[in-house]
Every structure is written in structure tokens, then in C-alpha cells.
């Protein structure tokens, strides 16, 4: 099944880099949509079928933590797998997010190999 | 001061290599001081609070944007975005080096940039304390960390 992926990051270049890596690692991808903060991401999730969310945490207007909290308490969004792609260094905060239902996390900066490993692992957990 | 310099160099070098495929090299004589500078700044609060600043020339930000985007983006917005993300990721690698306890949590601001007349002059910026100047493949980059 082709995956529809939402990339949420306030950095245009990071969104581009993530898109490029997705193209390189051979995922079966449908649509890739982008949002530059949590507010825009939630609007997209309201209107579009998304199978996987890749989200930064530190963003203006609405950061990733608030966005994930809203997703996990929303009927139509709570089951969508989320992987955080972040500079967050606190294991305490990461653990809290994993307990809230985030599937995995990827620490910036990352290589395409690290990205592929995390996404493959997430999809296995989600489908299996 | 030595620890601060080492920590800054370590965090910045890892970031620039993985994110933009660029290397920090030994300083050379007669390197060109940037005339048009851009400053990226990110602040943090937690067990220690402070600010990380990265000052460099416009030319370097073009290289940075080009490398991150695989040649797709070199416009002004991409250059500013590239330097902000460089500060963001460097700060993310630096903060664990400042931890007092593994349970510590930092809150980090969204990075901002100053350019044109609002950006500090190179000589004024690099004479301060707690900063280090690095050679990234022929381009000068100054990093300053202040915290308490």
C-alpha cells in the first residue's frame, strides 16, 4: 500500500532533505504533504488521508508536543503513527512522547541509513 | 573556556558533517573575513540558561543551503533557513554536554536570524569571551555560547 506521508518541520530545507531521503530509500509512497507547524499539520490531517507523520518538535505557532497531544486525543488522528525528527536531547521528554503513543524518534542530524532504519522499524511495528 | 570551546567545536563539527557534508579544517593564515555577515541565534532555559550564536558570511550560507538541499535551493530564504537549522541542530547536540543530571530538560526557542545592518560585524563579535572561530572548508564561522 502506498503511504501518504506528512512532513512537519518549520525548516523548508529540512523538509526537502527528508523528501529526498524518502525518495532514495525505496518506500512505496503515495502523496507527500508538508506543514511548517502544528497548526497547519492538524488542518491537513483534518482534510487529507495520512498514513505516517514525521514531525519536528521545536516549531513556531504550535510545536510538535502540542500537535502530538492533540492528535492523540482526536478520534480520527489518534491511530496515525508519528515519528519525531528532532534535535531534542532530553530522554525524559522523549520517553513521555513515546508513552503518549509516538512510534519512534530520529535525532537530527541523521543519515539516510538512520532514517531508513527508523521508518522501516516503525512500519513493521505498525503493520505487525 | 577550553571545555566550552571543545564542546562547541564537537557539536558544530558533527552537525556540519552530517547535515551539509562539510568539514571543519585547521585554521589557515590569511583567511578572508566575511564582510556581509549573518547571525543565527537560539536560546535555551533549564538547568542552565543561555544563548548559542553562529556568525558567518553570506557566501558560506549559500554553500550550506546548496549542500543541504542537494543544489536545489540557494535563494536568500534558503540561506537564512540553512543557518537557522544549523544553529538549531548544533544546539541540540550541545545541550547534552551541559547536562547536570540525565533527567534534566531544556526548553529551546525557535532560532532567529539577523542579517544586513542588524548583524554584528565580524571583528566586534569575535573579540568576546566564550566563542570559537572555525574554518569550514575555507569559510570562517564564529560560534559563541553564553550561559549561566
Image (tube, rainbow, N blue to C red):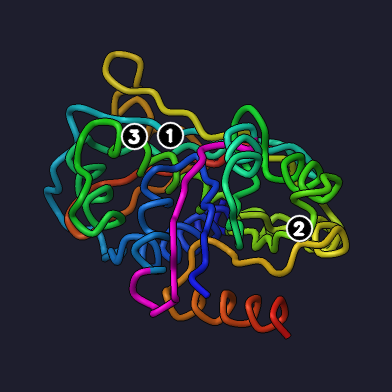
Residue A108 location in percent, x, y? 53, 61
- Asked if residue A80 is among those painted magenta in the image, a careful observer would answer no
Q: Please tell me whether mark 1 sits on a helix, a strand or a loop.
A: strand
Q: What is the crowding at mark 1: few (fewer than 14 residues within 10 Å), some, or many (at least 20)?
A: many
Q: Label 3 near label 2: C-beta < 8 Å?
A: no
Residue ID at (49%, 33%) = B41
Q: Is residue A24 magenta?
A: yes
Report whether A109 appears left or right of A101. Answer: left
Dot 3 corresponds to which residue?
B80
Task: Please state, as top left, top right, bottom left or bottom right, where the C terminus of chain B lies in the image.
Answer: top right
Determine crowd level at label 2: few under 14, some 14-19, many 20+ residues with C-alpha closer than 10 A: some
Q: Is residue A103 above or below residue B7?
A: below
Q: Is residue A59 visible?
A: yes
- From the viewer's perspective, is the residue at label 3 or at label 1 nearer? 3
Q: Circle 1 sits on which residue?
A: B40
Residue B128 coordinates in the image, percent (x, y):
45, 32
Residue closest to the eye, A3 or A17: A3
Residue A61 versus residue B112: which sits nearer the camera? Answer: A61
Q: Is residue B92 shown to the viewer in this render? A: no
Query: What percent of the width, then of the height, locates residue B67?
Result: 25, 57
Q: How far is mark 1 from mark 2, CA to CA? A: 23 Å
Chain name for mark 2: A
Q: Which residues are magenta?
A: A23-38
Query: Where is mark 2, residue-wise?
Result: A90
Name the foreground residue: A64 vs A43.
Answer: A43
Amino acid at each position: 500500500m502506498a503511504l501518504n506521508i506528512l512532513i512537519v518541520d518549520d525548516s523548508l530545507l529540512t523538509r526537502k532533505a527528508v523528501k529526498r531521503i524518502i525518495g532514495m530509500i525505496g518506500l512505496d509512497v503515495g502523496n507527500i504533504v508538508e506543514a511548517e507547524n502544528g497548526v497547519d499539520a492538524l488542518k491537513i490531517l483534518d482534510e487529507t488521508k495520512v498514513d505516517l507523520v514525521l514531525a519536528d518538535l521545536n516549531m513556531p505557532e504550535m510545536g510538535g508536543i502540542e500537535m502530538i497531544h492533540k492528535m492523540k486525543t482526536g478520534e480520527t488522528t489518534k491511530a496515525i503513527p508519528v515519528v519525531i525528527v528532532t534535535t531534542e536531547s532530553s530522554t525524559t521528554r522523549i520517553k513521555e512522547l513515546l508513552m503518549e503513543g509516538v512510534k519512534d524518534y530520529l535525532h537530527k542530524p541523521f543519515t539516510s541509513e538512520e532514517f531508513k532504519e527508523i521508518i522501516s522499524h516503525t512500519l513493521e511495528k505498525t503493520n505487525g | 573556556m577550553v571545555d566550552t570551546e571543545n564542546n562547541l567545536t564537537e557539536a558544530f563539527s558533527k552537525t556540519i558533517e552530517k547535515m551539509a557534508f562539510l568539514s571543519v579544517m585547521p585554521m589557515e593564515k590569511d583567511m578572508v573575513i566575511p564582510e556581509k555577515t549573518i547571525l543565527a541565534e537560539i536560546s535555551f532555559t533549564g538547568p542552565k540558561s543561555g544563548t548559542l550564536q553562529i556568525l558567518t558570511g553570506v557566501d558560506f550560507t549559500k554553500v550550506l543551503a546548496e549542500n543541504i538541499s542537494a543544489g536545489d535551493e540557494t535563494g536568500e530564504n534558503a540561506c537564512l533557513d540553512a543557518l537557522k537549522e544549523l544553529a538549531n541542530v548544533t544546539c541540540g547536540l550541545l545541550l547534552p554536554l551541559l547536562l547536570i543530571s540525565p533527567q534534566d530538560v531544556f526548553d529551546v526557542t525557535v532560532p532567529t536570524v539577523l542579517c544586513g545592518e542588524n548583524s554584528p560585524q565580524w571583528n566586534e563579535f569575535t573579540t568576546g569571551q566564550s566563542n570559537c572561530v572555525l574554518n569550514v572548508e575555507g569559510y570562517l564561522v564564529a560560534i559563541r555560547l553564553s550561559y549561566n
